[in-house]
Amino acid sequence: MCVVAVTDAVDRRSKPDVSAFEAFYRREYAGVVRLAFALTGRRDLAEELAQDSFLACHRHWDRISQYDDPTAWVRRVATNRSISSGRRHVTELRLLVKLRGERPPRPSLSESSDRLWEAVRGLPKRQAQVLALAFVEDMDVGRIAVTLGIGEESVRTHLRRGRAAIAARLKEEPDNG
């Protein structure tokens, strides 16, 4: 009887709590998709990045579920993957241009929010991440710092510089909408 109890305890410890992960996934998925969309500008890619981030989280759920804020972990993974996907996309476009000898057409954006997020995506990586977490996820400076693993003063600096850069870019660009 004692062996059965130990075996059951080992089995429970080695298997992640599926119901807790499912609840976490249902609660956080839409927010992670919004965050990835703000950074990539593509809904399909944002959903894919969110799913990949949650898959990585699920693989290590026994460890991640013990963190003070597992949400911060999955958002950090999503922001990093969003930035990486942007780099891959730019590289792919450059290669296509070389192969074709022509520039790909640039999509025209008319809504001011599209212009804003396009400008955010043009910022340095960390500024874009900080602004997306602040405005899409409505996170305060402390939560952004925890999510990205940087200091609060760095977050404030990136927010200040990012806002200034966005304001300057939007002021320069004519509103065609």
Image (spheres, grey):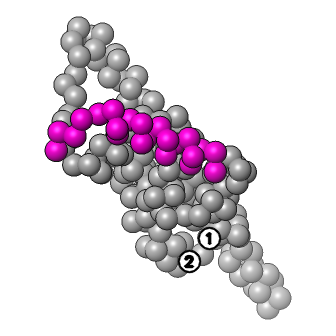
The one nearer the camera, 139 or 30, is: 139
The quarter of the image holding the C terminus is top left
The one nearer the camera, 146 or 115, is: 115
Q: Which mark is residue 20?
A: 2
- Horizontally, residue 136 falls left or right of residue 4, namely left
Q: Residue 93, image x and y in percent?
A: 32, 22
Separation (CA) of disc 1 from disc 2: 9 Å
Region of the chain picked out in magenta, as a range: 156-177
Q: Secondary structure at mark 2?
A: helix
Q: Residue 55, image x and y in percent?
A: 50, 56
Q: What's the residue type where badge 1 is placed?
A: Pro
Q: Residue 73, image x and y in percent?
A: 61, 58
Q: Are marks 1 and 2 in contact (CB under 8 Å)?
A: yes
- Horizontally, residue 149 falls left or right of residue 47, namely right
Residue 132, visible in the rendered structure? yes
Q: Secondary structure at mark 1?
A: loop
Q: Residue at x 49, y 41 (%)?
A: 164
Q: How many neighbours does mark 1 have within 10 angstroms: few (below 14), some (14-19), or many (20 or more)?
A: some
51 to 164, vertically: above or below: below
Q: Quadrant of residue 110?
A: top left
Q: Which residue is mark 1?
A: 16
